[in-house]
Amino acid sequence: MFKGVIELIRKGFKIRLILPFTLFLGLVCFFYFDFDLFFSWSNIRSDYAGLSHQSSENFIFSAIIFFFIYFIAAAFSLPIMTILGLLGGALFGWLAFLLCIFAGTLGCWIVFLATKGFLFNYLSKKSNPYISSITTNFNKGPFTWLFTLKLFPFLPISVSNIIAGVLGMNSSIFLLATFLAFMPGTLIWVAFGKRIDRFISADESISLSMFDNPDIFIPLIGLFLLSVASFIVKFLRIKKGN
């Protein structure tokens, strides 16, 4: 009987490993097979005429394909979501905004579930007071913590998904915070992408630098500073309560 219990635990551990291992393997394969080159600006510029024709001829089917690709990019933490947002804005207009935030939210949720199903279950069994303290403080204001992390400009979006999973965040709160946090950046990239024809016709390179496009980034910076202020207030309240 004891051996049977051990075997069930081992099987459960292996099952929980399948999803995170698959996501990690997909990310490795993406770079190993140089799939990132397909999403370079030079390739998109050379293929844009064909992509634009296909999307106009088969609009609904193309939108579904785009949704699926964006979902895969978010789920496997591929560093192509910005360029996809630009391309989506160029091909589908403001519809791309809805496609990106829904597909991105679902993709992030997959990473969250993979982390929560493996790392959280493992760490929750450890009687470490430091881990317990972090988890407790995070879950006193999970929406504020996660929303701030996702708006931090230098932090990959996958990191916030993993942190939320590791700390055992509630799924519904995660989905709401992720959905809302996707809106500002996605709105900027889609709006920028709607002007992509001008760059292609002029044979120019797109610069995503904050210094080259201050008018685009100012709203995002303002929202980030607002979320940081909320984060600080929440932190001070928790500290005062402790």
Image: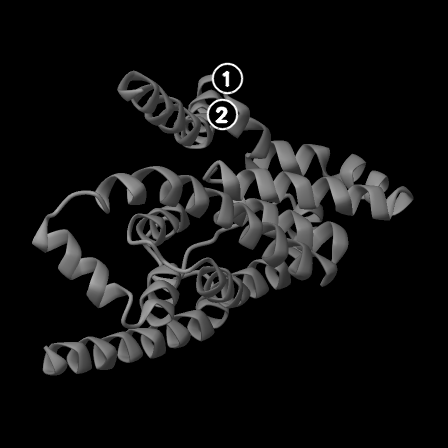
Q: Residues within 10 Å of mark 1 (few under 14, many from 20)?
A: few
Report if residue 198 is visible in the image: no
Where, quadrant-wise, is the C terminus in this rendering? bottom left
Instruction: Give the residue type that dot 2 points to.
Output: Phe
Of residue 228 and residue 153, the one placed in the foreground of this image is 228
Q: Which residue is mark 1?
A: 33
**Amino acid, disc 1:** Phe
Q: Is residue 140 visible?
A: yes
Image coords of residue 215 (percent x, y): 48, 72
> In the image, what residue occupies the spot 39% across and 66% down?
147
Other-residue count near label 2 (Cα within 10 Å), few / some / many at <14 / 14–19 / ≥20: some
Q: Is residue 14 above or below residue 94?
A: above
Q: Provide the residue designation for mark 2.
A: 30
Residue under the image location 45 percent in, 26 percent down: 18
- 47 or 111, which is in the foreground? 111
Q: Secondary structure at mark 2?
A: helix
- Identify whether 123 is placed above or below 86: above
Quarter holding the N terminus?
top left
Colour scheme of the rendered structure: one colour
- CA–CA distance in space, label 1 to label 2: 6 Å
